[in-house]
Image: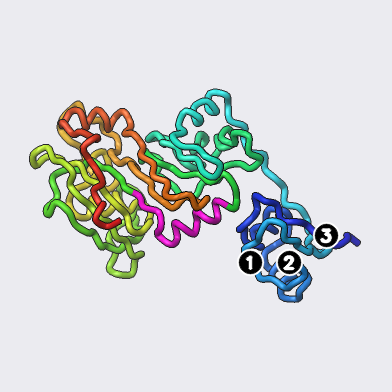
Amino acid sequence: MTAIETIEVAAEEGDLRLDRWFRRHYPGLKHGRLEKLLRTGQVRVDGKRARAGLRLAPGQRVRVPPQAVAAEPVPQTRRPVASKLDRDFVRSLVIHRDDDVIVLNKPPGLAVQGGTGTTRHLDAMLDALRFGKKERPRLVHRLDRDTSGALLLARSAAVAAQLGRLFQGRKVRKTYWALVVGRPEPAQGRIDLSLEKRAGPRGERMAGGDGSGKHAVTLYRVLEAAGPATAWLALRPLTGRTHQLRAHCAAIGHPIVGDGKYGGADAYLPAQEVARCLHLHARELSLPHPSGRGVLRILAELPPHMTQSWRLFGFDPELAGDPFAELD
């Protein structure tokens, strides 16, 4: 019979939940089976009974019973290896790097993860961002394929867990820039509109619900306008729903330029110089640094198509300041 194992929690596994630690070391052990082993005291941490949600600390010792050791392993699918071109490309996106996190300025058109018909995506390139670390960087939030801007990665499982709690606790401030059709009145406000998935002529999308959808809140401020035709908005989502900013802007009658999914034909400006691409950019991330060393604040430069539109309308990114400073 397979012997009992006792494994010491590694430094990079600190703050990892016990059930996720087992998933990493014993992928063939099903969650229900693990729960039974925990209930019966066969799994112990430093000699004591533990629950699945226990946060581990480096140096703790986990008792692993024979049933977990002998669990049938899950066949591992080989992760595709990124080409040298993609490795160089993803490294060129790095705008911040330290021992705990990496921040990329994601270009529009690049999917964060794979899906049906999506073979080239950021997740497949993350091995190129180890920069000497044993662990592969982890995505801790998402941006739509056509949304550009600041994307945060954790350089270890422990940091990913910390960042996950910051996002859940709404300790991460995100500011987006958007070019919208028309000029919202009033010039600043709060969009409080629940969202739910609905099927429509442009495919499945988020739309204002009747109260049964998911609660969603966005703050907005007009930074500059080019007459009544278009305006540059700063947007701060207070919740993190799918397509929240796109759906909210469309719901108040000012769709984001280039967003045909939510604005239809009304989302395009007649000026030929304005690209028919989504004009939505994750401009700023601000959060407590996971190391405890102050606040991490990252600004991501506009992508080329938005830079062109800003020049066309005479908007100056350097004059934006902090549009929501009074809230921080």
Give the distance between the C-alpha atoms of the residues marked 1 and 2, in whole angstroms. Answer: 9 Å
Magenta stretch holds residue 172:
yes
Element type where label 3 sits in the image: strand
Q: Tag count in the figure? A: 3
Give the distance between the C-alpha atoms of the residues marked 3 and 1, in whole angstroms. Answer: 19 Å
Image quarter of the C terminus:
bottom left
Image quarter of the N terminus:
bottom right
Predominant SS of the magenta segment: helix
The type of residue carrying mark 1 is Leu
The residue that disc 2 covers is 45
Quarter of the image holding residue 49? Answer: bottom right
Element type where label 2 sits in the image: strand
Disc 1 vs disc 2: Cβ atoms closer than 8 Å?
Answer: yes
Instruction: Pick whichever, 296 or 213, lies toward us.
Output: 296
- Mark drawn on residue 126: none
Q: Is residue 205 visible?
A: yes
The residue that disc 3 covers is 5
The residue that disc 1 covers is 54
Quarter of the image holding residue 179? Answer: top left
Where are the magenta residues, as a range? 159-174
Q: Quick check: 277 left or right of 222? A: right
